[in-house]
Image (tube, rainbow, N blue to C red):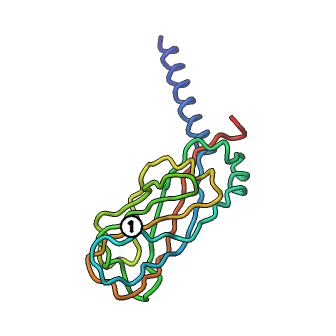
Amino acid sequence: MKTFNFTLALVILVTLSGCKAIDSLTHFTIPFNTNVTIKSNLNIGSLPFIPTPPIPLETDQTFKSNNTAKELIEKAYIKTLKLTVLKPDGEDFSILKNIEIYIAADGLDDVKVASLDLVPTGKSSIDLNCSNADLKPFIMKDKFTLKIKTVTDEINTKDYDIQIDGSFWLDAKILGV
């Protein structure tokens, strides 16, 4: 009986560690970045959506180095999304009360991918809370845009250049397996 229990425990241990090893081969990230300008505005409250320029998804090399292909993606979501004030020098995100970011691509409905309900004052760089929305359809596209929705709590008399750095987390089949 002790041999059976030991063998069963060994099989379970090997199986679980094997799954983690396989996961490390099928999970990877794709970074992206872009810039956007929040224009000066004398209104306080919700502002119109601010679109980014199109962001190309140059995934061919990433897929190749991970032994997979676009059509083998099973799941995708935003893993990280960080915003940094580039200009004006010395400014921070104190003009914002909250922020939401949506992903958009031709032929697809916009999906909320990140937000921050209470933007901290005094910070020139913020990490947003990312959703777990499945973005596989967006990964299948050649490019996407982000749409930023902000609510201000003070008058903004300056243009703010913002850098957006993010990454997608992907789960893919390897070589069709």
Image mark count: 1
**Local secondary structure at mark 1:** strand
Q: Furthest residue to the top? A: 1
Q: Furthest residue to the front? A: 107
Residue at x 43% of width, y 63% of height: 101
Give the x, y percent position of residue 70: 67, 48
Is residue 150 placed above or below 103 in the rendered structure? Answer: below
Residue at x 65% of width, y 58% of height: 142
Q: Is residue 21 left or right of residue 150?
A: right
Q: Quadrant of residue 141?
A: bottom right
Residue at x 49% of width, y 55% of height: 78
Q: Is residue 99 left or right of residue 14?
A: left
Q: Is residue 64 left or right of residue 165?
A: right
Query: Which residue is disc 1 drawn over?
Result: 149
Residue at x 51% of width, y 14% of height: 4
| Label 1 Cα crowd, 10 Å radius (few <14 / some 14-19 / many 20+) | some
Give the x, y percent position of residue 28: 60, 51
Is residue 173 placed above or below 107 in the rendered structure? Answer: above
Residue 130 vs residue 16, the one in the foreground:
130
**Which image quadrant: the C terminus?**
top right
Give the x, y percent position of residue 162: 47, 77
Residue type at mark 1 is Lys
Give the x, y percent position of residue 68: 70, 45
